[in-house]
Image (cartoon, grey):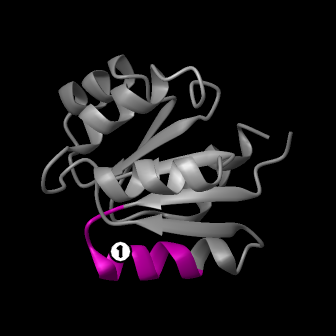
Amino acid sequence: MPIQKILLVDDSKTELHHLSELLGKRGFEVRTAENGEDAMKRLGEEKPDLILMDVVMPGQNGFQLTRAITRDPRFSSVPVIMCTSKNQETDKVWGMRQGARDYIVKPVDPTELMAKIRAFD
């Protein structure tokens, strides 16, 4: 099934705006959440085709949230791509262990991001 609906989870309004615009221009339907609580609320309203997840957020961080989402039978089929400034190999390994299906480092390269999203089509 082609990816159309993307849930973007990031506590930075600048990042949300930038990525929403980037994805919107490429024809994706984007919904946003600024924290874990917000993300779970959005998931309850509508199941996305893919989640782009920041790591460093107040409250529940992206690693914890990814683990909660990917272990929930309702959302376990939704791929999560970690999208973060944390660029250490250990961060990537930990993100994948939490259930993420891919990992991209900020600042996001639009071509790389599109390739990662298209890999799930």
Q: Residue at x 56, y 55 (%)?
A: 113
- Local crowd at mark 1 within 10 Å, few (<14), some, or many (≥20)? some
Front one among 43 and 21: 43
Q: Residue at x 55, y 48 (%)?
A: 44
As drawn, the residue found furthest toward the left would be: 58
Q: Residue at x 64, y 26 (%)?
A: 77
2 versus 28 height, above or below: above
Q: Residue at x 27, y 34 (%)?
A: 63
The prevailing secondary structure element of the residues shown in magenta is helix
Residue range corresponding to the magenta coloring: 10-21
Q: Which residue matches tag 1?
A: 15
Q: Quadrant of the C terminus?
A: top right
Front one among 107 and 10: 10
Residue 95 in the magenta stretch? The answer is no
Which image quadrant for residue 75? top right
Q: Position of residue 91 (x, y in %)?
A: 22, 32
Which image quadrant for residue 21? bottom right
Q: In the shown orientation, is residue 112 left or right of residue 103? A: right
